[in-house]
Amino acid sequence: MKRDVYNQQNHMMAAANRTGSSNSWQRKNGLERERVPKPFVIGVAGGTASGKSSVCAKIMQQLGQDDVDHKQRQVVIINQDSFYRPLTEEENARALKGEFNFDHPDAFDYDFMLSTLKDMVAGNEVILPEYNYKTNSREEKGHTVYPADVVLFEGILVFYFKELRDMYHMKLFVDTDPDTRLSRRVLRDTKERGRDIENILHQYTTLVKPAFEEFCLPTKKYADVIIPRGADNTVAIDLIVQHIQELLRPSTNKIGTKRPRYNSDSFVGRPH
Ligand SMILES: Nc1ncnc2c1ncn2[C@@H]1O[C@H](COP(=O)(O)OP(=O)(O)O)[C@@H](O)[C@H]1O
Ligand SMILES: Nc1ccn([C@@H]2O[C@H](COP(=O)(O)O)[C@@H](O)[C@H]2O)c(=O)n1
């Protein structure tokens, strides 16, 4: 199973990092690097098509990270969709008819998600799969996420799992009107995810909407900041960016400068 390959690779990189020196596997793969302190982790939750990715992209852009080479980026975005678990044949047949529940917590590979976030917090780089919504599966090829000062972890259920939730230093909930979300999802899924309208509406009414109400919406109470209207809310995004800059600035670090990096030990996420 693909998960094992990713887990194995990430496990080897984490082990090498714990020793503080590059091992032969890392050297062979060109992964030698220095240890880095812990990042500031931000969870970004919200319903489907609420604008989570767009909000993260704006935060990234306003922190001046867009034009920075991936290896040098001080802000990285991890999408929860990378952690959808592989489907059985029977589940895939249902998925193609819009009858598999991708909005239920069981649709995710929880262990992989947790180990990945722990790796990022430990300052390790990780390899994540690209997710293909047309085949409902992971692509063969993964992409490397390098250690960063700020990790944005976004997805419909990133607040659902307690152990993950407790790892965030800041929690944002993108709150967009359901009609707006549905219309955006129809446009996006027909254009980008190879779906037809009947399939989208069937999946939405029977699975997506009920699961949103059962699993996603109740997690809004964990948010530190609720962002109405998503990426259109430039005031909220400006305030969040200022806050991140402030946290990263003082004696320890300033985003946009090199090491020493921010040390998050003094920032503990609110326990819930
Ligand atoms: N403020 C906006 N105005 C218009 N379209 C938007 C806006 N925000 C997001 N979209 C579009 O809606 C779709 C879903 O947005 P996205 O940011 O990917 O949401 P999410 O990550 O929550 O699924 C995308 O096609 C995106 O381009
Ligand atoms: N194979 C898949 C996987 C996921 N989905 C839907 O994607 C939504 C989550 O992504 P957003 O960018 O919209 O947050 C979720 O609501 C799933 O229903 C899918 O349709 N097919």
Image (cartoon, rainbow, N blue to C red):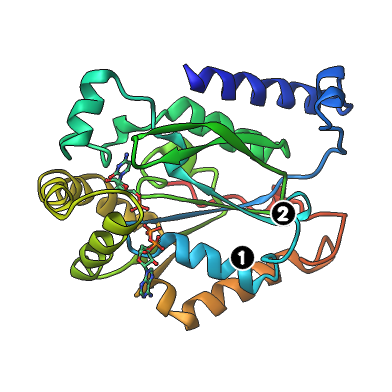
> Residue lying furthest bottom in this view?
235
Q: Residue at x 22, y 67 (%)?
A: 183
Q: In this orientation, which residue lies closer to the viewer: 120 or 206?
A: 206
- Residue 43 image position (x, y, % from top left): 49, 53
Q: Inspect this view and state whether residue 48 appears.
A: no
Q: Residue at x 20, y 27 (%)?
A: 93
- Count of numbered circles on the image: 2
- Residue 49 image position (x, y, % from top left): 32, 60
- Residue 24 image position (x, y, % from top left): 87, 18
Q: Is residue 16 left or right of residue 180?
A: right
Crowd around label 1: few <14 · some 14–19 · many ≥20 (10 Å): many
Q: In this orientation, which residue lies closer to the viewer: 254 or 146?
A: 146
Q: CA distance from mark 2 to mark 1?
A: 12 Å
Q: Is residue 99 left or right of residue 57?
A: left
Q: Which mark is residue 60?
A: 1
Question: As shown in the figure, which amino acid type bears the numbered disc 2?
Answer: Asp
Question: As shown in the figure, which amino acid type bears the numbered disc 1?
Answer: Met
* Ligand 1 within 8 angstroms of badge 1 C-beta: no
Query: Quadrant location of residue 65?
Result: bottom right
Q: In this orientation, which residue lies closer to the viewer: 186 or 214?
A: 186
- Residue 46 image position (x, y, % from top left): 35, 57
CB under 8 Å between discs 2 and 1? no
Q: Earlier in the sequence, mark 2 or mark 1?
A: 1
- Disc 2 element: loop
Query: Label 2, on which residue?
Result: 149
Q: Residue at x 50, y 43 (%)?
A: 166
